[in-house]
Amino acid sequence: MIVRDFNAIVKSERDRVVSDAKWSSVRMLLAEDKMGFSFHITFLEAGSEHTFEYKNHFESVYCMQGTGSITDLATGETHMIRPGVMYALDKHDRHTLVADEELVMACCFNPPVTGNETHQEDGSYALELETA
Amino acid sequence: MIVRDFNAIVKSERDRVVSDAKWSSVRMLLAEDKMGFSFHITFLEAGSEHTFEYKNHFESVYCMQGTGSITDLATGETHMIRPGVMYALDKHDRHTLVADEELVMACCFNPPVTGNETHQEDGSYALELETA
């Protein structure tokens, strides 16, 4: 059994915290944990906008806190985001996420993120083979 | 892109809500969604105790609200549960979960739950083939 505490990670396991200018993410589970998915708590700064396209991953995102919107760039459709709303990128959907207030999201990735990926210019993660 | 709202499901999609005497769970993503994992928001009643062993599934559980504890029945070790604590049953660990206050948990299963499983007498879910 693996037990991890978000608050302890933020204090003392900074290698599990990744940040960019307008977002940060705490890696609760990665590929090396052998669960077949990874699990992350992600913060998007109030007023920020992000375009992502995970060409190689399925991702589900559950809003725990904050408000904003997500636009499906294939259809132009926009959905409100508030606590309790989940979106799942079952078609590797290219999308723009807007945080009106700070968003706190619980995210699952399949295949699991290894921790070595970087966002590419097109907003995707490269598919990394686990080396751990 | 799949978009679902926990609050709308609770109001009007009751087939996505499963309950037992002391717990209930909202199925945000199931096997038929083809994400490779399922995602559930689960409530455990204050004062309740549960023994589970998912012999056929890996499960991660992130505490969003409430306090309690989890005991690994193989080692006897007990861990406190409070918001931000996650446990992951990477060894299909048989465990007892105690809710001191009502617990609200975000749960991921691999393989994904189909929605047709029932808890068996030993606390496991049978492995169901997706029929959808």
Image (cartoon, coloured by chain):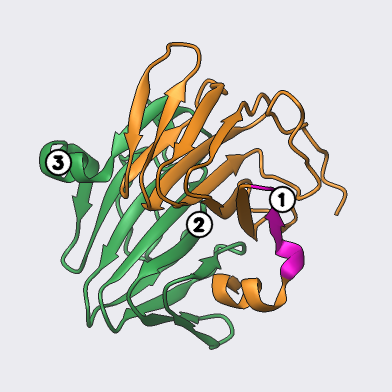
Chain colours: A green, B orange
User: Is residue B104 left or right of A122 when viewed as pictured?
Assistant: right
Residue A36 is labelled as none
The chain carrying label 2 is A
In the image, B53 versus A68, the foreground residue is B53
> Percent from the top left, x then y, of residue B90?
50, 25
User: Does residue B52 belong to the magenta stretch?
Assistant: no
Task: Give the residue at x 44% y 24%.
Answer: B71
Cα gap from disc 3 to disc 1, whole angstroms: 34 Å
Residue A59 is labelled as 2
Residue B31 is labelled as 1
- The answer to whether marks 2 and 3 sit on the same chain is yes
Cα gap from disc 1 to disc 2, whole angstroms: 14 Å
User: Is residue B94 left or right of B18 when viewed as pictured?
Assistant: left
SS label for mark 2: strand
Q: Residue furthest left?
A: A11
- The answer to whether one can see residue A126 in this image is no
Quadrant of the rendered image containing residue A77: bottom right
Residue A14 is labelled as 3
The quadrant of the rendering that contains the N terminus of chain B is bottom right
Q: Amino acid at mark 3?
A: Arg
User: Is residue B60 left or right of B116 when viewed as pictured?
Assistant: left
The residue carrying pointer 3 sits among few (fewer than 14), some (14 to 19) or many (20 or more) residues within 10 Å by Cα, namely few
Q: Is residue A102 above or below residue A132?
A: below
User: Does residue B19 belong to the magenta stretch?
Assistant: yes
- The answer to whether one can see residue B34 in this image is yes
> Percent from the top left, x then y, of residue A83?
42, 73
Task: Give the residue at x 25% y 74%.
Answer: A102
Q: Is residue B96 above or below residue B77?
A: below
Q: Amino acid at mark 1?
A: Ala
The chain carrying label 3 is A
> Percent from the top left, x then y, of residue A91?
61, 64
SS label for mark 1: helix
